Amino acid sequence: MAPDVVPTAAKLRHRLAARLADDGWLRSPAWRAAVEAVPRHEFVRCFYRETDTPGLTAWTPVTAGLCGFDEWLRQAYADETLVTQFDGQETDWNDPKPISGAHPTSSSTLPALVVHMLEELQVDDGTTVMEIGTGTGYSTALMCHRLGPDRVTSIETDPHVAARARHALDRCGYAPRLLVGDGLAGDPEGAAYDRTIATCGVRHVPYTWVRQTRPGGLVLATLRGWMRSLGLVRLTVDREGRAEGRFIDSDSSFVIARQHDAPASLGVIPAPDDGTSRRTPYGPDVLTSAGTGFMAQLALPGARFFSLPADDGTPRTYVLDATSASFAVLTPKSDDDWNVRQGGPVALWDMLENALDTWHAADCPVPTEFGVTVTGKSQRVWLGAPDGPCWRLPAFLSPSGL
Ligand SMILES: C[S@@+](CC[C@H](N)C(=O)[O-])C[C@H]1O[C@@H](n2cnc3c(N)ncnc32)[C@H](O)[C@@H]1O
């Protein structure tokens, strides 16, 4: 390492902490001290940064060797997500190439989101934490600084990612309990923890996390689907083994847990005369707009969508649910009138319209008005209160991951 890295990094860290505090993410002195102390650059010696390319998501490799110490350090302390792995494959850092069209599978999360979650974890001195998704090890290191390494367990599913994190934590003098394996199974040996925090997104809360968090403890996780993220939830575990709580925000989004990722196949594209047609007032924008998109993800937990022009150039949006072999195809009739053609065992667009009717009847509530209840038997998202209108999460997966 160049000799002036240490003081320069310390200055950049203090600047990052000040910015996170000004933006309202970093609120407590103890977490601020952790951000000021933990050298993020040790966890992101090599990473990819997203670059602006019209119509394409592309990433450029960043190391001190490629862009110089000053620029590498500046980027290591930027409030940005730094991607460290794509498609579960390790990069050859002897000859890194720009990347496009790939799927990030590991990263050092946006520092604002990391500290937001840590603040929302509501820890005290002495709190024990189980983290799912070690990634680079940066958030693990922050927790080691705040709580002491002997109170921190972190689980990473990818052995290469886990090895890099272990080396980085070693270099910084932190020795938490690090496990390599499927974090959805938690850590039965180390349980029960005061807090469980997931830094990978999940389609439902693995019930093991509830069982391995002590009564009165908290589970903090980002729920997401295959269309979009639902947001960050904080659940309190009770003595009966139930966890309940509200969405804290709907902006948080994480790399999805590998075992919850969507199947490669979108499903079968229906033939032009498959299914039954009717008119609908809802067009494809309900799938992407903030409030309605949240409802779409709740109502259609197994669905994904894409748009393609038909032979005559008419735009068509296909909503496909590979888990139930169901489909809905939207085509425009006029400015605010659409045709939907549905088929398969589940009438997808009917499900979505019902959810949107409920949402409109409740005055278009924001995601923080929704909550989640998790038991050993079912998981549901409710509106307003636990006995309000509800939607089931896809809680019980088959061995194929569906
Ligand atoms: C966004 S990164 C974690 C960021 C990390 N906390 C940091 O500060 O660098 C998500 C990580 O979760 C890991 N992951 C995905 N599924 C997992 C699972 N089932 N169990 C444990 N880790 C998992 C990924 O391999 C990835 O490294």
Image: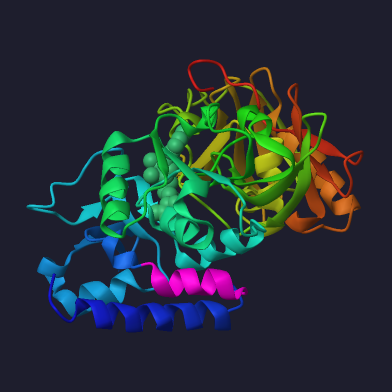
Q: Nearer the viewer, residue 22 or 370?
A: 22
User: Which residue corresponds to the image point at 62% horizontal and 74% vertical from the top-left?
Assistant: 27
Up the image or down, 345 lies above or below 129; here it is: above
Question: Which secondary structure class fits the magenta region best?
Answer: helix
Quadrant for the N terminus in the image: bottom left
Residue 152 visible here: yes
Q: Nearer the viewer, residue 37 or 182?
A: 37
What's drawn in magenta, residue-wise?
A: 27-38
Q: Position of residue 286 (x, y in %)?
A: 67, 51
Taking the image as four quarters, which one is ligand 1 found in? top left
Q: How many marks?
A: 0
Q: Position of residue 41 (x, y in %)?
A: 29, 66
User: Which residue corresponds to the image point at 71% horizontal and 44% vertical from the top-left?
Assistant: 217
Up the image or down, 336 lies above or below 176; here it is: below
Q: Nearer the viewer, residue 226 or 221?
A: 221
Answer left or right for 125 relative to 400.
right
Answer left or right for 241 relative to 157.
right
Up the image or down, 370 lies above or below 261; here it is: below
Q: Position of residue 231 (x, y in %)?
A: 63, 52
Answer left or right for 178 relative to 27.
left
Up the image or down, 14 lies above or below 105; here it is: below
User: Which residue corresponds to the image point at 46% horizontal and 56% vertical from the top-left?
Assistant: 144
Q: Position of residue 102 (x, y in %)?
A: 30, 46
User: Which residue corresponds to the image point at 58% horizontal and 21% vertical from the top-left?
Assistant: 397
Quarter of the image where one finds residue 369: bottom right
